[in-house]
Image: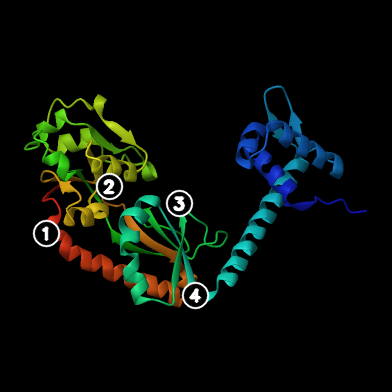
Amino acid sequence: MNRLLSGTRALRTLEAAARHLNFTRAADELGLTPAAVSYQIKEIEEQLGVVLFTRTSRSIQLTPAGTVLFDAAADALHTLQQAVSKARRLTRGDAQLRLSVGARFATHWLLPRLPQFQAEHPGLALTFDISDAVRDFAADDVDAAIRFGAGDYPGAVSHRLFHTVVVPVCSPALLQSGRPLGRPQDLFNHTLCYVDCRPGGIVWPNWPMWMAAAGVDGFDDSRSVAFAESSHVVQAVMDGAAVGLVEWELVERDVQAGRLVRLFDVGVRVAPEYAYHLVYPAASASDRRVCALRGWMLRTVCAADAIKQHYQPGSFHE
């Protein structure tokens, strides 16, 4: 009589426990308790009549039989995920395109321009996967992605959109408050905020880096406020409470509209090999939906370049 695992829950539990070799971390990933993971593993072992893990007081290890089943479970889950993704794409049909995009880019660049895309392509609806995680086009339900990086994505086509420069901005209200902001040293008397992140392992430009680029000595960054997302920096600035370091390319429309004010003629460029890219599977290069998005996005970027020359800072430091 064949003894098989019943359902995908057992497969997911086995795969997570074997990958982490830690029931607590597996439980966190699965939304279970460590006791529940341990019970499910024991249940699988009893059902199959096979010992999958050796346990000590400090660690767990896979047995040879456990390794075989772990590899099979990982392959099965990956295959199933690919099938689910394909099924969802088939259900969506050719009237939708699902784009994976980070919250920062979506909020400050894409969404304000989305009506333009909709006007040009009224029969095509964009839906979004808001995430900075790199997606697997074969396994995840996405057709294309916007990613910040070096543009090297195996098996995919990548179009460089633009690099990014970090500049200081404030609200018009703060500028009119009477507190000096005529020279970089005046920033010492203001609350300064910035984005604290390391995309691809690089350090995102912060206030010490900007002050160094501006030739300012003796800066104490202990009062600077770090945020994980640039949207929080922009909100703090618009509230009139702070001066923030933000990506020029993502706030230029706010500056042009007078909602924000760019300060000083200095910007710090993120590592030059890094930029925002439009990415999609090589097999989708002729997909009409991808072609529509690609054409619109590249035209929009080119048009913005001409406008940007008037507003962007003149001094950049890499």
Tell me which numbered mark, 1 or 3, is placed earlier along the sequence.
Answer: 3
Q: CA distance from mark 1 to mark 3?
A: 32 Å
The answer to whether any part of residue 286 appears in the image is: no
Q: Viewed as shown, does residue 250 lie left or right of 24?
A: left
Q: Which residue is outermost to the right?
A: 1
Q: Which residue is mark 2?
A: 271
The residue sitting at 75% across, 41% down in the picture is: 66
The residue sitting at 16% across, 47% down in the picture is: 261
207 versus 280 height, above or below: above
**Three-letter residue code for mark 4:** Ala
Q: CA distance from mark 2 to mark 1?
A: 23 Å
Q: CA distance from mark 2 to mark 4?
A: 38 Å
Tell me which numbered mark, 3 or 4, is placed earlier along the sequence.
Answer: 4
Q: Percent from the top left, x then y, of residue 200?
A: 38, 45
Give the SS element for disc 2: loop
**Three-letter residue code for mark 3:** Ser
